[in-house]
Image (spheres, helix red, strand yellow):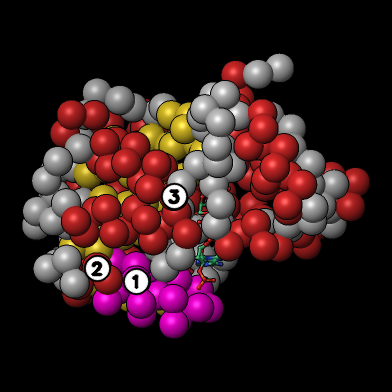
């Protein structure tokens, strides 16, 4: 799979799953822009790893909860790279609490970064992709959008919104040659989990229950994302591809 000469933007591309996707895209020849929010050190390290693969990288610091900062981020993409071929909507943030304890502030926080930012970024990306005859948009969702996990109510609801939007955008943007899909992960061990109550017990329980017998690696999400960005996946539209080692098959 070659993405030579393509321009890709990965939101939250500095760490975890986003970083794995950014590095795989760079290995396949794409120039990769990395968005991050507060952790500049991690972002700089990832950008250096991307450039070491012989392609261009550029850091975009933006809080994706802010519509103005999203707009400015895409203006910078256009100014520096002259267009965009691939958007990976990966950045997310969660407040891990039972539904009964989620406040209006928590709800807005999660919806704004996990769902609204996708809508606004896709609108901006589509404008840049139309100038190049098309493109690919892939979001990262989670099986908590349709299954119930402890403390995951707010994140799960925001991922359900993201998945619904994936289907609407896939239909609306198809006439412009833009394919929109999502990859839904089971539990992937990243820094996110260090903030989770009962982390170790949850990791052990998921490992035990997963038919494939282990926890996912970020690269295993990245491989499927790259396939969805390839011409071989051109006729896949508005789908949510589950990568969870079989966990969500069980009742
Ligand atoms: N880990 C899992 O088990 C799992 C499972 C299924 C799906 N997912 C999904 O996969 C994606 C990546 O998860 P992850 O575990 O790799 O996350 P992570 O390690 O916590 O990294 C989150 C990334 O998002 C960025 N970010 C956070 N808030 C932001 C904001 N307001 N504006 C811009 N960027 C922001 C962070 O940048 P800074 O570091 O600069 O703040 C960081 O680059 C998410 O969509 C998540 O829901 C994760």
Q: Whole-Å distance between the Cαs marked 2 and 3? A: 16 Å
Residue drawn at point x = 39 percent, y = 61 percent: 19
Does dot 3 land on a helix, a strand or a loop? Answer: helix
- Judge from the rendering whether residue 187 lies leftward or rightward of residue 229; answer left or right: right
Q: Give the x, y percent position of residue 160.
A: 61, 36
Can you tell which mark lies on residue 189?
Answer: none
Q: Which residues are magenta?
A: 33-48
Q: Are marks 2 and 1 in contact (CB under 8 Å)?
A: yes
Q: Give the x, y percent position of residue 25.
A: 24, 53
Towards the viewer: 175 or 250: 250
Q: Give the x, y percent position of residue 82.
A: 15, 66
Residue tagged 1 = 46
Does dot 2 land on a helix, a strand or a loop? Answer: helix
Residue 234, by quadrant, is top left
Towards the viewer: 121 or 201: 201
Which mark sits nearer the N-terminus, 1 or 3? 1
Residue drawn at point x = 16 percent, y = 34 percent: 231
Quarter in which the N terminus is drawn: top left
Residue drawn at point x = 45 percent, y = 81 percent: 40
- Judge from the rendering whether residue 225 lies leftward or rightward of residue 7; answer left or right: right
Q: Residue furthest bottom?
A: 41
Q: Is mark 3 within 8 Å of ligand 1?
A: yes
Can you tell which mark lies on residue 50?
Answer: 2
Does dot 1 land on a helix, a strand or a loop? Answer: helix
**The magenta stretch spans residue 246:** no
Q: Residue furthest right?
A: 100
246 in relation to 47, above or below: above
Residue tagged 3 = 218
């Amino acid at each position: 799979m070659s993405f030579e000469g393509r321009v890709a933007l990965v939101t939250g591309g500095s760490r975890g799953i986003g970083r794995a996707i950014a590095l795989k895209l760079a290995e396949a020849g794409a120039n990769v822009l990395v968005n991050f929010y507060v952790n500049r050190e991690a972002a700089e390290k990832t950008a250096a790893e991307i450039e070491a693969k012989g392609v261009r990288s550029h850091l975009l610091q933006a809080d994706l909860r802010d519509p103005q900062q999203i707009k400015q981020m895409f203006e910078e993409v256009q100014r520096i790279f002259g267009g965009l071929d691939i958007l990976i909507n990966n950045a997310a943030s969660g407040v891990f609490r039972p539904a009964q304890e989620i406040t209006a502030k928590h709800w807005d926080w999660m919806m704004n970064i996990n769902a609204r930012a996708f809508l606004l970024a896709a609108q901006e990306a589509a404008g840049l992709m139309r100038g190049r005859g098309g493109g690919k948009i892939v979001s990262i969702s989670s099986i908590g959008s349709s299954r119930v996990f402890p403390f995951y109510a707010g994140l799960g609801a925001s991922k359900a919104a993201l998945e619904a939007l994936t289907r609407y955008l896939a239909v609306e943007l198809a006439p412009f040659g833009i394919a929109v899909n999502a990859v839904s992960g089971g539990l992937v061990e990243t820094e996110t989990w260090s903030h989770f109550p009962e982390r170790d017990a949850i990791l052990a329980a998921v490992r035990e229950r997963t038919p494939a017998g282990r926890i996912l690696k970020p690269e295993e999400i990245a491989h499927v994302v790259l396939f969805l960005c390839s011409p071989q996946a051109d006729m896949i539209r508005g789908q949510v591809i589950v990568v969870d080692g079989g966990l969500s098959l069980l009742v």
